[in-house]
Every structure is written in structure tokens, then in C-alpha cells.
Image: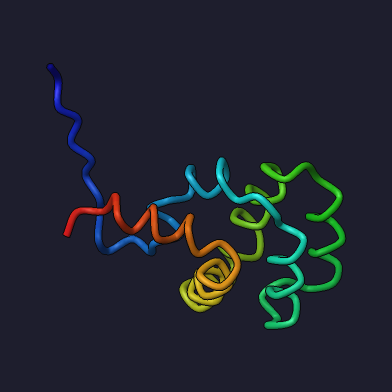
Amino acid sequence: MRTCVVLVNPKKHFVDRHRSALVQRISSMAAILDQLMDRRVVSKEQYDTIIAEATRQQVRQLYSGPLMSSGTTGKDIFLSVLEEMEPFLIEDLRRDEPR
């Protein structure tokens, strides 16, 4: 039996460490984007561009655009929104991290 060891860089932001899982598992981006626009992480123009895509592509566009340009602050806000709107997903991802 093989054991798989996951190496996690604790210096990377939670959102960066779990980018792939977030792309695959976020279920509803519209409400998340609404919150991010209200908190000024995403502009109206960015919102309109992102919302026109399929869900997985929306997460990719959000990550590569507004979240990358807003740095740690934007990622912290995104994580806060995810904790509110996708609590089971975030709990599951945290459970999988080494302590």
C-alpha cells in the first residue's frame, strides 16, 4: 500500500494552497461575486466579465484577475466570504491540511 504525503507551504495563502480544489468545488459563484463586489474586491466591469463564464471558469478568472491584483487583502476577503457561503467546503479543506 502506498502512502501519499501532501506537502503544504504554510507561507502561501489558504486560497493559493487550495486553488485547484476551489476551482473544482465551489458551487455557486454569483452570490460570492455579489459579496466581493460589495466589499470592492471586484469591480462592476470585472463582475460582468466573470459572471458570463461557466462556474469553473468564473473561479479561474476571479483568481487570475481580481484576487491576484488585490493580494493578501483580497484573498482574505474572499476566504471570509467562502467561510460564510461555503462553510463545509472550507472546513473540509482545513481538515486536510497538516497541523
The relative height of residue 3 versus residue 85 in the rendered view (above or below) is: above
Viewer-closest of 11 and 79: 79
Q: Residue 14, position in %: x, y?
A: 39, 62
Q: Residue furthest bottom?
A: 39
Left or right: 6 in relation to 42? left
Foreground residue, 65 or 79? Answer: 79
**Residue most extreme to the front:** 88
Where residue 40 sits in the image (x, y, percent)?
70, 81
Q: Nearer the viewer, residue 63 or 98?
A: 98
- The residue that appears at 27% across and 64% down in the rendered structure is 11
Pick the residue in front: 96 or 56. 96
**Quadrant, the N terminus:** top left
With 34 as the anchor, is 52 left or right in this view?
Answer: right
> Which quadrant, please, contains the C terminus?
bottom left
Q: Is residue 36 above or below residue 10?
A: below
* Residue that appears at 55% across and 76% down: 77
Q: How many marks?
A: 0
